[in-house]
Amino acid sequence: MQFQDALALYKQGRFDEADAACAGVLERDPKHFDALHLRGVIALHNKSHATAAEFLRGALAVSDMNAAARNNLGMAEQQLGNTAAALASYERAIALKPDFAAALSNRGNALRSLGRNDEALASCDAALSARPDYADAWYSRGLALRALARPHEAQISFAKAIALRPDYADAHNALGLVLEEAGQSEAALTQLDKAVALQPGLAEAWNNRGNALQSLRRMQDALASYDRSITLDAGNAQTWNNRGGALDALGRSDEALASYDHALALDSGLAGGWSNRGTLLATLGRRSDARASFERALAVDPHSADANWNLSLLDLQEGDFARGWARHEWRWKVPSLKLMNRDFGTPGWLGREPLAGKTILLHADQGFGDAIQFSRYAPLVAAKGARVILEVRAPLVRLLARLPDVAEVVKFHDPLPAFDFHCALASLPLAFGTDLTSIPAPGGYLQADTAETARRRVALGEAKRPRVGLAWSGNPHHANDRRRSIGLTQLLATLPDGFDYVVLQKDLSAADRALAASRGIAVFGTELEDFADTAALCSALDLVISVDTSIAHLAGALGKPVWVLLPFNPDWRWMLGRTDSPWYTSAWLFRQHAPDDWSRVLDAVKAGLLSRRA
């Protein structure tokens, strides 16, 4: 059989027969360049990269002036992890053929692997200049742009690759990845579903698909996707790590811990795995083990934002405010928090610069509860001689406009006036060096509008029994919401008669609304347009009972008696063991004694209410 016969078989996709035919040619002529080259190409197709490199080196020993062979050898070397050798091979191919789009694109991939991302992008652009319709170069360009932290441009490049080649599974996977990183989880899932439909064996896409499903809170589906990825590639530590997150969210803590441990057995240098393991251990109340896990993460990567931030939560929870506040600044770099570290064009303030005669912007950086808790510092900033501007989200504007010594309250996204300094609200405890003895205004620092409170009392009718406000669930998108919220059915089953209960939550499910109505519980719902309305309603009550959500902070900031129902591992601000709060002297804390067990908490609430009724 002649080489032309082997080539014909290759073109028909009959690769094994083509390889055997080339072997026959080489028996007669061991230095037949084309046969050696084609055997190398077939081995590349079969992912036998070491064999491919051997044949391609053999071909180039016969003739080293073939650009295609040099490019193919580069591909084999890159798959073998020999990136520097791959780059040298691509460079030689380009020297032989300067407009060789495939070699220019592959050179871009090698440069990116070496961290030379600007050069990688330039090489991909050169490939596209030579061949604008080259889908692989658009894909490689997208990878370089992602490495350069230019995600929007990366999306455009991946989309261009897909437009040129709709069945390009890797490009669908990459587009799904950058969409997920941009918080567009639904769009990401669409792309990742296409990737796995086109190439069911693409383990990376199944893993990325699991991440998108986790973001969409579809944990059981996420777990199935991770398991499919692991079936295809059981040695990927990151997939085991991600799988642990899904199991944790499903309440399967022992399995989650085992999954994290397996990830770390595969790769002990996986800082994210140590950090996730620590978070789970803290949730289980194993705080010393959690701290050790976070510190192991920092030994691997001292700049791990997750580990530093999680350590700050342990420090603050344990009352070590000096270390806690400093570490808490790592929150800006934690991807899962998705905080906006905005460039205001003015210096940040953390307590060092004098403020007399200056204007400072205090801006909310986290949730509603955090903004309420840390807004207490605004008068202290004003006392330093500053004109204080407060920027918060719309539902808080009217409430926090009642803070003393605040010159102006601006709604988030509205134009900002000029200012000299800025500080995030959650950074103010650091700026003031707050410790347990110096928390400002723990007795309350907000007031509801008296006229609005009077109207709420009228709406509630004549007070014949104590009025108790209820908030049993928080933001469903909060990472810990499963552990901190209670079902209304479970709550009401415990609450005794003899009180007039009032719903303080604005948004209720249809089932909860019907249940409240069946028990004669007052629901204001959409009448509570913002926190000022809710503050007026709270002020018309005798007691507030709330899980750890913004309502608890609101009641505490008003100085209203509030019973806060806490999970086994509470948020840092409620600290450990105590029944009181240094942040809110009107708060009484009810704590779980075991993870996810509300029974003793609710029994204690019932006993407390009965004692009040007596």
Image: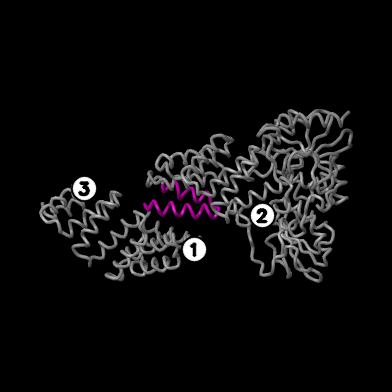
- What secondary structure prevails in the magenta region? helix
Check whether the beta carbons of the residues at disc 2 and disc 3 lie within 8 A of each other. Answer: no
Q: Is residue 22 above or below residue 354?
A: above
2 or 3: tag closer to the N-terminus: 3
Q: Amino acid at mark 1?
A: Leu
Residue 308 belongs to the span the image colors magenta: no
Rendering coords of residue 578 (x, y %)? 78, 39
Name the front one of labels 3 and 1.
1
The residue wearing badge 3 is 14
Identify the residue at image location x=79%, y=56%.
400
How far apart are the alpha carbons under marks 1 and 2? 27 Å
Identify the residue at image location x=78%, y=30%.
604
Question: Looking at the rendering, in which quadrant would you find the C terminus?
Answer: top right
Disc 3 crowd rating (10 Å Cα; few below 14, some 14-19, many 20+) is few
Identify the residue at image location x=81%, y=46%.
584
The residue wearing badge 2 is 327
Rendering coords of residue 139 (x, y %)? 40, 59
Q: Amino acid at mark 3?
A: Arg
Q: Secondary structure at mark 2?
A: helix
How far apart are the alpha carbons under marks 2 and 3? 61 Å
Residue 339 appears left or right of 21: right
The residue wearing badge 1 is 148
Image disc number at residue 500? none
Name the front one of labels 2 and 3.
2
